[in-house]
Amino acid sequence: MSQRVEAESCPPPKMVVVREFDEERDKAAVEEMERRCEIGPRGKPSLVTDLMGDPICRIRHFPSHVMLVAEYGEERRVVGVVRGCVKTVTRGKSMYVKVAYILGLRVCPAHRRLGIGTKLVQHIENWCQKNEVEYAYMATDSSNEPSINLFTKKCSYAKFRTPTILVQPVHAHHKPISSSKTLILPLPPQLAQLVYRRIFANSEFFPKDIDKILMNKLNLGTFMAVPKKSNFKWNPSNNPLQLLPPTFAILSVWNTKEVFKLQVKGASPLTYAWCAGTRALDAYFPWLRFPSIPNVFKQFGVYFLYGLHMEGKQGLRLMKSLCALAHNMGRDDGGCAAVVAEVGHRDPVRDGIPHWTKFSWAEDLWCIKKFTRANDGADWITSGLSSPVIFVDPRDF
């Protein structure tokens, strides 16, 4: 998920102290500071995030993580935060590297342009180096120039990848799935991780601890779709890596609404009435399958789709069936308003993911920085795109 920061023009003040987050001491101050950061431009809608009383919720599911706070002045007021986590991922060609993901950088609006964001990044980088990471990366909206300038011009990050975030609103009606043509199989975590390790071995950012992700309580399941006439069945007595059918689609569903909630604020009364009208029409006449807009003006959650892959002649149709399944799961969950996926802009699976262009991000810019020499002497940054497939870790979203 992207992060936003404002441009900075002054060196860090001497009255700024960066230290590790203390939940008992800092929780209330951090929540208040982040609420101030959520205020959008007057007259325009803004998307507000509620971490539901857990400031480290977005990094809690990584074995190694940290949150830093910046204090300002003699009163030691919390004016900025940044989060980081460490994991091991693929960089293509079945090679693994240790990386850090930097996220959640925020600076209080009243204390911007003082170099506080730069100082927070420098301190989180020191933590990354102590954890012996080879690379650190961050994500931001491609139109967020202040954030891009901070990381690329002041902190020496390089623009690296531009995945696409695809958003499908959850309608009041169920999406049809052809039971006569499609067989959808739930995969147990042990089997799912074997399949994933095979099909994503040559991708980028595939996490080595995929087994822990699939076993996490936030993972709602992994599903494989195959043609109904294939009569495909898993046989545990055989080698699972030799059991993949000639045409199939697979994905997993992550429940982010148990981590954070979103809410649209500042919309006009006309927009609110129009959205409510679409929901009413869809609810009363579900057979019309009217593309209604969920109530995003109250807090809502999203389901994040990851591990999306398809093969064979019917792969595209099967992927659309799995996305319909995820939509219907969200529809039956009163707190889910959207189904979201993030994939490489050249990944073939992108064509099989239903989405609304208006609600999606064409480019989510990832920037990266090298800290240590890679084990094989090659530089991931300058070696070019090794694979069109980017595995987006659901814990990153």
Image (cartoon, rainbow, N blue to C red):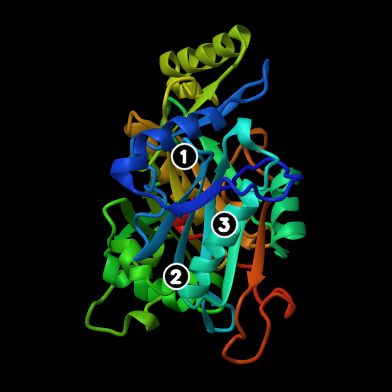
In the rendered image, residue 187, in percent from the top left (x then y), is placed at: 30, 63
**Could you say which quadrant of the image residue 145 lies in?**
top right
Amino acid, disc 3: Leu
Q: Which residue is mark 2?
A: 87
Asked if residue 145 lies left or right of residue 72, the reply is right
Q: Earlier in the sequence, mark 2 or mark 3?
A: 2
Q: Residues within 10 Å of mark 2 (few under 14, many from 20)?
A: some
Q: Is residue 388 above or below residue 288?
A: below
Mark 2 and mark 3: Cα distance apart in space: 31 Å
Mark 1 and mark 2: Cα distance apart in space: 32 Å
In the rendered image, residue 330, in percent from the top left (x then y), is placed at: 38, 37
Q: Earlier in the sequence, mark 1 or mark 2?
A: 1
Q: Which residue is mark 3?
A: 316
Q: Residues within 10 Å of mark 3 (few under 14, many from 20)?
A: many
User: Which is closer to the viewer, label 3 or label 1?
Assistant: 1
Amino acid, disc 1: Arg
Judging depth in this view, the residue of 278 and 369 nearest the camera is: 369
User: Which is closer to the viewer, label 1 or label 2?
Assistant: 1
**Could you say which quadrant of the image residue 37 lies in?**
top right
Q: The residue tagged with tag 3: helix, strand or loop?
A: helix
Q: Can residue 63 be seen?
A: yes
Question: What's the residue at 63%, 40% (across, down)?
Answer: 360
Q: Which residue is mark 1?
A: 76
In the rendered image, residue 197, in percent from the top left (x then y), is placed at: 43, 76
Q: The residue tagged with tag 1: helix, strand or loop?
A: loop
Amino acid, disc 2: Lys
Question: What's the residue at 37%, 39% (across, down)?
Answer: 257
Judging depth in this view, the residue of 32 and 252 nearest the camera is: 32
Q: Is residue 262 above or below residue 57?
A: above
